[in-house]
Image: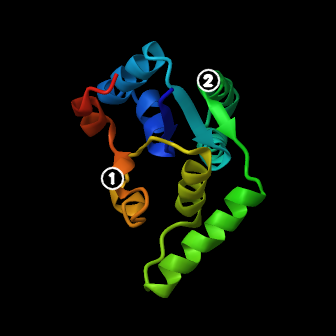
Amino acid sequence: MMIVLLDTTELVGIDRGNPNVIDMCKRLTKANAKLLLSIITVSEIFTGTYLKKDSKDAVAKARRLLAQFEWIDMNAKIAEKTGELMAHLISKGEVIEYQDVVITATFLVAGGDYLITENIDHFSRFPQIKAKVYNAERFLDLNVC
């Protein structure tokens, strides 16, 4: 079974009606891929929804969207991997958002096949996942599902 972790940017893409992201998710669902979200992505989505004027409706909509994915909670393995990855970046003088480091650690611990994001630059800084990071458009070009 293919394991795919979606970054926050992809859920925003669904919300905004991005045809590539929607098509990709439909294909992955049809192919019975395991679609994962880091709990960090879940919290980022809820942050955005609570900032909206119509937050009650936005939260309900977000819950419906998020329910379609498997959430991966932060645990000891992910915390340790996050520390390892963050130390690697700091030692190279490259720092990215903590949230993206946790999402990367989640992907690695979950044994993901593909990490889908529109923020390829951040995630490609990790050599162990660089070849597995795609945006929706490039992922569709792979024709893996």
SS for dot 1: helix
Residue 131 badge: 1
Give the answer, above or below, for where 14 lies relative to 74.
above
Give the answer, above or below, for where 34 lies relative to 43.
above
Residue situated in front as seen by the camera: 19 or 112:
112
Q: Position of residue 38 (x, y in %)?
A: 62, 45
The mark closer to the camera, 1 or 2, is 1
Give the answer, above or below, for where 115 lies relative to 83.
above
Mark 2 Cα-neighbour bin, 10 Å: few <14, some 14–19, many ≥20:
few
Residue 61 badge: 2
Write the residue at 51% across / 44% down: 8
Q: Position of residue 100 (x, y in %)?
A: 53, 59
Write the residue at 49% across / 39% down: 6
The kind of residue tagged 2 is Lys
Give the answer, above or below, for where 26 lies relative to 21.
above
SS for dot 2: helix
Write the residue at 38% across / 67% down: 125
What residue occupies the far right of the structure in this picture? 76
The mark nearer the N terminus, 1 or 2, is 2
Rendering quarter of residue 92? bottom left
Mark 1 Cα-neighbour bin, 10 Å: few <14, some 14–19, many ≥20:
few
Residue situated in front as seen by the camera: 82 or 109:
109
**Side of 143 where 103 appears, left or right:** right
Residue 2 badge: none
In the rendered image, the quadrant that contains the C terminus is top left
Disc 1/disc 2 C-alpha distance (Å): 33 Å
**Side of 138 where 104 appears, left or right:** right
The kind of residue tagged 1 is Ala
**Side of 57 where 134 appears, left or right:** left
**Mark 1–mark 2 CB contact (< 8 Å):** no
